[in-house]
Image: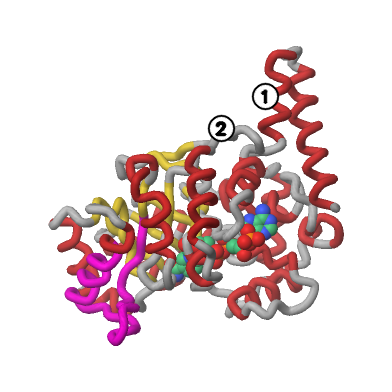
């Protein structure tokens, strides 16, 4: 109910803007765009110092794997998003069947998108679990290539290995070998806190994938300025804070619990009451996405979903642009006032 009311509001807002500009010919187009029936113009950003220009809204492949999405749903979801302007898909070797679902759904459209995956876990039975040796990393990448039905992956991230493993260097040697062999065009580190900082300073990586959202702001001072200075591409993972405001009580999904607890303490006005279900750009989802997208140094938000209509909805929210400076600084101020020392970047 709240959703349909705010969709109507969005349609009216888009229509009013163009009517005010006296552009009657474009009016129906504005209505179609605001109602999600026509592609939104998605902002593109140069991804660090790579040759990639990525749309600010990507696709995160964890949900389709862990929620065991149907192949037909993934096919519909990804094709619709690609038609609407998606050009970056992120997944990982260990997100159950995520890579297989993506490979089967859109391998024939490989030129239409940048493909990122993560390595370091051999989930092929019987050898399951992390393996940060050089050969383990290379084996993981080989498996991804097959499952994704491609010859080359645009960017492979190390999937959240510890600082100790990074310092040992075997996993980095594996990535560098894959790059040399033409299996990965670029390489990155996916993780948070001290390990992410070390990875940036090491000079071995083209990219950082890290948690950035209204409930996870450690990176905004610890790593993001440094990544920007060193010209790394930055992928914001968990960018909508798992939409933790949608739960009235502690979620059953344990993965969403930490942000749900943090949100209760942060008590942002935009994530309370009716605004939780407001699907417009000033509702909880809109504010959360726009906050992440406007952080200096962020290039792409990889929101996870199993819903075919979600990508276009979120693209429409992002098309509203950055939050007002006042709202953004109030979110930062609330975090600085209430964040506990243990609120570190969530893997
Ligand atoms: N260590 C790592 O490297 C690591 C760790 C975590 C995540 N990641 C990557 O980051 C991606 C994103 O992370 P994530 O999926 O954990 O978190 P997320 O993108 O912050 O949250 C996804 C959740 O938000 C919901 N959602 C999306 N748009 C919404 C909207 N407009 N309104 C209400 N709910 C909305 C989705 O539900 P619906 O199904 O209802 O849309 C889904 O349950 C992953 O897919 C993965 O690629 C990497």
> Which of the two marks, 2 or 1, is nearer to us in this view?
1
Q: Is residue 171 left or right of residue 96?
A: left
Give the image quadrant in which the ligand numbered 1 is located. Answer: bottom right
For disc 1, does the CB lie below 8 Å from ligand 1?
Answer: no
Q: Badge 1: few (under 14), some or many (20 or more) residues near its Cα, within 10 Å?
A: some
Place of residue 144 in the rendered image (x, y in percent of width and height, measured from the top left):
30, 64
**For this rendering, which residue is in front, 114 or 299?**
114
* Residue 139 on the magenta span: yes
Place of residue 314 in the rendered image (x, y in percent of width and height, measured from the top left):
62, 47
Residue bounds of the magenta highlight: 116-144
Where is 12 relative to 331, above or below?
Answer: above
Residue identifier under label 1: 29
**For this rendering, which residue is in front, 41 or 266?**
41
Query: Mark 2 to mark 1: distance in Å?
Result: 12 Å
Based on the displayed image, in which of its 4 quarters is residue 7 positioned?
Answer: top right
**For this rendering, which residue is in front, 314 or 309?**
309
């Amino acid at each position: 109910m709240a959703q349909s009311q705010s969709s109507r509001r969005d349609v009216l807002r888009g229509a009013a803007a163009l009517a005010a500009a006296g552009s009657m010919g474009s009016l129906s187009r504005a209505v179609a765009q605001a109602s999600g029936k026509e592609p939104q113009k998605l902002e593109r950003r140069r991804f660090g110092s790579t040759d990639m220009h990525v749309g600010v809204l990507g696709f995160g492949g964890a949900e389709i794997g862990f929620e065991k999405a149907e192949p037909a749903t993934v096919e519909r979801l990804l094709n619709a998003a690609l038609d609407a302007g998606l050009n970056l898909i992120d997944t990982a070797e260990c997100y159950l069947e995520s890579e297989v679902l993506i490979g089967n759904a859109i391998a024939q459209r490989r030129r239409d998108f940048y493909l990122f995956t993560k390595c370091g876990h051999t989930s092929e039975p019987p050898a399951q679990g992390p393996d940060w040796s050089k050969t383990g990393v290379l084996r993981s990448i080989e498996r991804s290539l097959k499952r994704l039905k491609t010859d080359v992956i645009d960017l492979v991230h190390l999937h959240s290995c510890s600082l100790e493993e990074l310092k040992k260097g075997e996993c980095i040697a594996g990535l560098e070998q894959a790059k040399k062999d033409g299996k990965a065009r670029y390489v990155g580190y996916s993780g948070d806190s001290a390990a992410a900082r070390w990875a940036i300073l090491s000079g071995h990586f083209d990219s950082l994938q890290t948690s950035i959202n209204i409930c996870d702001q450690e990176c905004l001072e610890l790593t993001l300025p440094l990544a920007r200075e060193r010209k790394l591409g930055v992928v914001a993972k968990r960018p909508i804070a798992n939409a933790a405001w949608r739960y009235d009580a502690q979620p059953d999904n344990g993965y969403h619990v930490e942000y749900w607890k943090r949100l209760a303490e942060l008590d942002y006005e935009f994530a309370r009451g009716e605004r939780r279900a407001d699907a417009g750009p000033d509702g909880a989802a809109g504010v959360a996405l726009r906050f992440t997208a406007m952080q200096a140094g962020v290039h792409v938000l990889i929101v996870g979903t199993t819903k075919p209509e979600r990508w276009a909805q979120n693209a429409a929210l992002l098309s509203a642009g950055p939050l007002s400076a006042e709202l953004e600084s109030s979110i930062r101020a609330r975090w600085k006032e209430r964040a506990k020392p243990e609120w570190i970047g969530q893997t």
